[in-house]
Amino acid sequence: MIRDLKYLSVLSFDFLIKNETPRQPRLEYSGKGSLKPDYAKPVCFFCSYDKESTVRRNVFHYLNELVQAGFNVVFISSSDTISDADLKKLSKFCVRIIIRENKGHDFYGWKTGLREYPQYRAHSALLLANDSVLGPLFSIRDIIAKLEDKDADIVGMTDCLRFHPHLQSYFLYCKKSVVASEEFAGFFERVEVLEFKMAIIRRYEVGFSRLLSHRFKLSALYNLEDILDRVQYLERPKNQVDTTFHLWKPLITEFQFPFLKKSILTRRGISIEEVAAALADSNSSYTADILSDCIVSPISH
């Protein structure tokens, strides 16, 4: 009860700064990719943004790994434009490509995907993902089996206790029962354009877990409690620990965690050389030149 009251109190500021009449982002393009949908497979709604309207090497790497792992991909870009060459290349990995105005961040992007690709309901599951992470750093060819074998209805890569216990939204695997639920549909119907990042985290990233957890079981493949038990991290209270940010190196070297947050390079200032060394020590085939490509311009994802 106390935790819920604290969460509601921090939301109050978000409602104060919310736009009075938010405008729905324009849909710039929606077209089929070269791949035909296979409804026996899960579909991934993959949100991407690049300030220079370039589809980076890591994005193509990630999409290829998703396809090889057994996902159909719906690519949702909020970049100003995508070149014809990149569209042609993207098409090889996708069942649909969507370009929309850069408003509302990923949750509104996923909302757009639900509207533009209603066939998602026919797929075996739905993965919500984005390009705020680099990778996969290690193979994810068996990831669907791991996600399906997990005793939970919604499975994330990592969880966090900040504001309220929740799954981090860069990777959210929703099983069929969740996707077909009124709670899931209702959540996205209520998603609006918010631009303040902390408001998005509180209202949508945390809110998604809070709402869906009333009916469904949630779990993370790389659980915060388990990680803290193994790495003995005592620099912060655990409700302030973001494992992908504060514990990025042991995640790679001890757990072979498949992703690295872009913010490690762009905001925390960790060098490419330090990351490359950790990857080499862990026998990752992910290369330093892909890391370099992602930080040509500032990230505002």
Image (cartoon, helix red, strand yellow):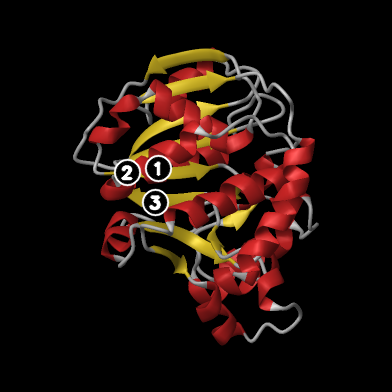
Q: Residue sitting at 40 percent across and 46 percent down?
A: 65
Residue picked out by circle 1: 184
User: Dividing the image into 4 quarters, which one contains the C terminus?
Assistant: top right
**Comes first in the chain, label 1 or label 3:** 3
Q: Which mark is residue 181?
A: 2
- Secondary structure state at the residue bearing disc 1: helix
Q: Nearer the viewer, residue 29 or 214?
A: 214
Q: Residue sitting at 73 percent across and 55 percent down?
A: 10
Q: Residue 128 in the image: x percent, y percent?
A: 45, 43
**Is residue 65 visible to the viewer in this orientation of the structure?**
yes
Crowdedness near tag 3: few (<14), some (14–19) or many (≥20) residues, C-alpha within 10 Å: many
Give amino acid for label 2: Ser
**Is residue 275 visible to the viewer in this orientation of the structure?**
no
Look at discs 2 and 3 and give the one toward the viewer.
Answer: 2
Q: Which mark is residue 173?
A: 3
User: Which quarter of the figure has residue 43?
Assistant: top left
Q: Is residue 2 above or below residue 191?
A: below
Look at discs 1 and 3 and give the one toward the viewer.
Answer: 1
- Secondary structure state at the residue bearing disc 3: strand
Q: Nearer the viewer, residue 100 or 187?
A: 187
